[in-house]
Image (cartoon, rainbow, N blue to C red):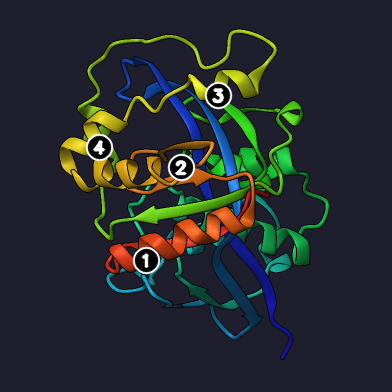
Amino acid sequence: MTAFRETGWAKINLALHVRRRRADGYHEIETLFAFVDGGDPIAAELAGADSLVIDGDFAEGLSAGSDNLVMRVLALLRSRYDAARIPPLSVRLTKMLPVAAGIGGGSADAAAMARLVRANFLPELGDATLARIISPLGADIAACVTSETCLGVGVGEELSPVPELRLGGTPVLLINPRRPVATGPVFAAWDGIDRGPLFTGADMRAQLFGARNDLQRPAIAQCPAVADILLELGGLKPWLTRMSGSGATCFALFDAAAERDAAAASLAERHPGWWLMTGVLR
């Protein structure tokens, strides 16, 4: 039987500026999303009834029921369109990205499932429409629909392209200490100080060096290993290194794949317990 396939691409925040805490409890942010050419593969086949199987390195403890974001996307799209157009599917999610890691794994998987359904059953849906429908399931999901570098404001759902950055193909290394970090407590521990906007002029690439992740300090308070990772990465001479999202994953961008691979080999030898992924930005 033919399998439909997609991938939930790993998301990183090249910068994340928290501007204010809203009355509804959410936070206004300015963030630069980028995506890596690796992630969680999803395969689906026609079936008599919906089902979800989760395997892979980080499958343990994940729910394969109707509350999983992958299945919630399926139900949501059926509720918005003729349900008969989307047949029952047997879905396999291979979880290769760590969870609660600041790289949008759940959101990326949800967006990948939405793209899979669109490609095979709802081809008339554009990216903007698809993002609008599924974005209530998570703030990062809208960016994950296209999985391309973009600027996100609001709670991260208001997106605009940044073609002038031209980051596609940049060698990247992701590192996680294999310690989950919950998003809510990290945002709650933000000190409330607005340290200014992400971009204030035309040269975004130059300003990226002076940007920051305002969640880095509260994340380190919960997971000190983040500081260890950043210290190690700084000694490997990437042109940019920072924590992604609410942690604990950190990234490093390099000028050449050979430099990235040498850094990965060095870290793997010295810290065999850390999770590493190499790739390039999409």
State the residue at coordinates (51%, 17%): 198
- Residue at image mark 2: 138
The answer to which of 79 and 166 lies nearer the viewer is 166
Identify residue for label 4: 219
| Left or right of residue 256: residue 62 | left
Disc 1 target residue = 268
Q: Nearer the viewer, mark 2 or mark 1?
A: 1
Q: Residues within 10 Å of mark 3 (few under 14, many from 20)?
A: some
Q: Residue at x 17, y 41 (%)?
A: 222
The mark that comes first in sequence, 1 or 3, is 3
User: How many residues crowd around disc 4 within 10 Å: few (fewer than 14), some, or many (20 or more)?
Assistant: many
Q: Residue at x 62, y 77 (%)?
A: 44
In terms of sequence position, does the residue under pointer 4 or pointer 3 come before the other?
3
- Answer yes or no: is residue 75 visible: no
Of the numbered discs 2 and 3, the one sitting upstream in the chain is: 2
Whether pointer 4 and pointer 3 mark residues with C-beta atoms closer than 8 Å, the reply is no
Viewer-nearest of discs 4 and 3 = 3
Q: Nearer the viewer, residue 127 or 6?
A: 6
Q: Amino acid at mark 4?
A: Ala
- Mark 2 and mark 3: span between their CA atoms? 26 Å
Name which of mark 4 and mark 2 comes first in the sequence.
Answer: 2
Q: Earlier in the sequence, mark 1 or mark 4?
A: 4
Identify the secondary structure beneath mark 1: helix
Looking at the picture, how far across and down is residue 237, in whole percent?
Answer: 47, 41
Q: Inspect the image, locate mark 2, and give the three-letter code of the amino acid beneath it.
A: Gly
Name the element at disc 2.
Answer: loop
Separation of residues labelled 4 and 2 (CA atoms): 20 Å
Quarter occupied by the N terminus: bottom right
Image height of 205 relative to 106, above or below: above
**Disc 3 target residue:** 208
